[in-house]
Image (tube, grey):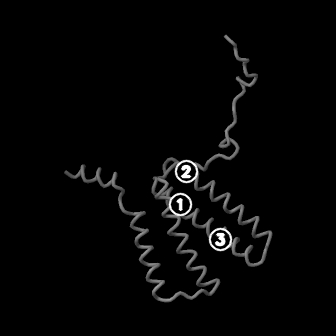
Amino acid sequence: MVERARSPFKDVPTMSVTDVFPLIKAPEAWPVPVVATIAMVCLAGLDLLGALFAKEWADNGSVRALVLGAGAFLVLFWVYASSLRYAELALVTMGWVVMLQVGLVLIDRWRYGVELPTGKWVAIGIVLVAQAYLVLAPSAERAASVAGAGG
């Protein structure tokens, strides 16, 4: 029988990536819906900021915009990963996307002068209502528990 050599690092504690870049921790007293909402707003804001820097870089080739945009998306990833400790992936993502879409449409309209015809505004409204339903409507699991508790 061949005996394996012992690792000289066996007693050395290993370091994880989260030791260097710890995830954001919300206060324990905060309810999950509050944490999820704050996360969605932060994600949408960071994504909007990154989008504006991307537009600036695409239009003018600004190295400053490239660096700041990349930084915004790195922070976005960190906030996103942190938020998933508290809320469901689909909930956080859908809420973030809804807020991002509203922000992008408004920025396009006011900053870049993009004019949308009435039909597109109606379509945007319908999509936002549908997405709000997906985010706010009770999940099947929660709906079943509410129905079971009522009877």
Q: Earlier in the sequence, mark 2 or mark 3?
A: 2
Placement of 40 over or under 58, stated as above or below: above
Looking at the rendered image, the disc whose residue lies closer to the viewer, 2 or 3, is 3
User: Which percent across, then down, holds residue 33?
Assistant: 45, 57
Amino acid type of the residue tagged 2 in the rendering: Ala
* Depth check, front residue: 150 or 140: 140
Q: Which residue shows up at 50% across the image and 50% down it?
A: 86
Q: Which residue is mark 3?
A: 51
- Gap between marks 1 and 2 measured at Cα: 10 Å
| Residue count near mark 1 (Cα–Cα under 10 Å), binned few <14, some 14–19, many ≥20 | some
Q: CA distance from mark 2 to mark 3?
A: 27 Å
Which is nearer the eye, 36 or 105?
Answer: 105
- Name the spot of residue 6 as percent of width and height, x first: 72, 18
At label 1, which amino acid type do we have?
Ile
Query: In the picture, residue 44 is in which quadrant?
Result: bottom right
Q: Please, what secondary structure does the residue beneath circle 3 have? A: helix
The residue tagged 2 is 26
Whether residue 147 sits left or right of residue 123 in the image: it is left
Q: Looking at the image, which residue is at 63% across and 65% down?
A: 46
Sooner in the amino-acid sequence: mark 1 or mark 2: 2
Mark 1 and mark 3 lie on one chain; the one further toward the N terminus is 1
Q: Quick check: marks 1 and 2 in contact, CB under 8 Å? A: yes
Task: Residue 94: give its label.
Answer: none
- The residue indicated by pointer 1 is 38
| 56 relative position to 87: left or right | right
Q: Residues within 10 Å of mark 3 (few under 14, many from 20)?
A: some
Disc 2 to disc 3: CB gap under 8 Å: no
Q: CA distance from mark 1 to mark 3?
A: 20 Å
| Residue 20 placement: quadrant | top right
Could you say where residue 120 lies in the image, as x and y percent from the top left?
A: 48, 84
Q: Quadrant of residue 17?
A: top right
Residue 116: give x, y in percent of width and height. 53, 87
